Image: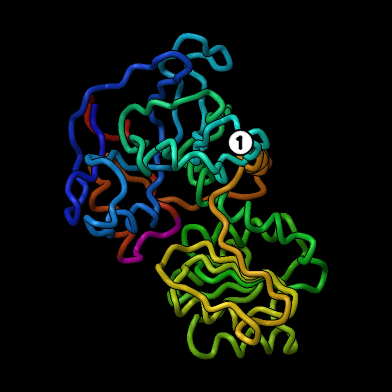
Amino acid sequence: MRAVQYHTVGQPPEVRRIPEPEPGPGQVLLEVTAAGLCHSDVAVMNWTAEEFPYPLPLTLGHEGAGRVAALGSGVDQFSVGDSVLVYGPWGCGQCHYCARGKENYCPHAAERAIRPPGLGAPGALADYLLVDSPRHLVSIGDLDPVRTVPFTDAGLTPYHAIKKSLPKLVPGSTAVVIGAGGLGHIAIQLLHVLSPARVVALDISEDKLALAREVGADEVLLSDEHAVGKVRDLTAGRGAELVLDLVGSDVTGRTAAGCAGVESDLTIIGIGGGSLAVGFGLVPFACSVSAPYWGGRDELIELVSLVEQGAVHSKVEVYGLEEVPDAYSGLESGTIDGRAVAVPSGGPPT
């Protein structure tokens, strides 16, 4: 089968031929119908050899959807042909967090070398994907896997972040979204679906701001030296109740702190390599700063329900598997409109 693999540190990924996996006991083999590309992949491929924690070659792709192709012994929760999403942050399945569906916060995953597909384990950018357990699959029925697969990360991550702040997003409140691209355009929709808050989108790209308007942002602002003052003006000096930093650089962190109000939530989701100084006088009084990771299995199920209702959607650019290396270049340069999704069936036969 074909697989998009990161083979050598510092070199671009390549489409290679590798053996097709076979499911063992308790495992599920998927024929991949869609696989999302993410800035996290770019960040991984920008690590130095000293920083790189995973065995190489690594098949990329931590957003996956597929049809069940084969079942290992003992698996009876799904049938061959079922259409599913893959829940990415795999945990031990036995601890307190995993029992609550929060495998994204499993304290044992790292020590036991349990890694997400595409982020240590073989990923979804391939013709087939081996999933370790049926508990990591969510049925999507007749939903389009291409437009649904971004919700496994680009939807799940902001959904998880927004849910914890809902008590603060009362009528008259404001939520600021910094970064209106792949995650941002979904976050804007989720904020409107889940809360009555006014949504203000910030970005350095006019194209991304146009996308933010298209999906319902109430206000759009260039993320420049004037952005903080404009947010303060929009909120009568109060600041926002929630700021989502979907970039995570030093610059956006400072902008986020400037936009945040007293008793607000400042949530850093982006992995742009920045940091934010937190202390008395450095952020607003009682401002809660957090850096969540992904989301729970229950939240992915909830998101699928929102997609089924037509409450949220993802804007995607579709690529064949052979085009993925070039698509990563577009992702890194910021020219992708929404999310990039690979469709293996669009390429040559295996």
The image position of residue 340, as x and y in percent, is 39, 51
In the rendered view, tell whether residue 28 sits above or below residue 171: above
Task: Determine the residue positioned at 48% across, 63% down.
Answer: 270
Element under label 1?
helix
In the rendered view, tell whether residue 197 sits above or below residue 322: below
Q: Which residue is mark 1?
A: 98
Residue 264 is left or right of residue 176, and the answer is right
Q: Nearer the viewer, residue 44 or 37?
A: 44
Q: Is residue 307 magenta?
A: no
Q: Quadrant of residue 334?
A: bottom left
For badge 1, the amino acid type reads Cys
The image position of residue 158, as x and y in percent, is 59, 56
Task: Determine the residue positioned at 34% across, 64% down.
Answer: 335
Helix, strand or loop: magenta stretch: loop
- Can residue 269 be seen here? The reply is yes
Q: Is residue 335 magenta?
A: yes
The image position of residue 344, as x and y in percent, is 32, 34
Q: Nearer the viewer, residue 88 or 180?
A: 88
Mark 1 is surrounded, within 10 Å at the Cα level, by few (under 14), some (14 to 19) or many (20 or more) other residues, namely many
Residue 309 is left or right of residue 255, and the answer is right
Residue 280 is left or right of residue 185, and the answer is right
Q: Nearer the viewer, residue 207 or 252?
A: 252
Magenta span: 333-338
Task: Determine the residue positioned at 41% across, 24% down.
Answer: 30
In the rendered view, tell whether residue 300 sits above or below residue 38: above
Count of numbered tags: 1
The image position of residue 84, as x and y in percent, is 52, 29
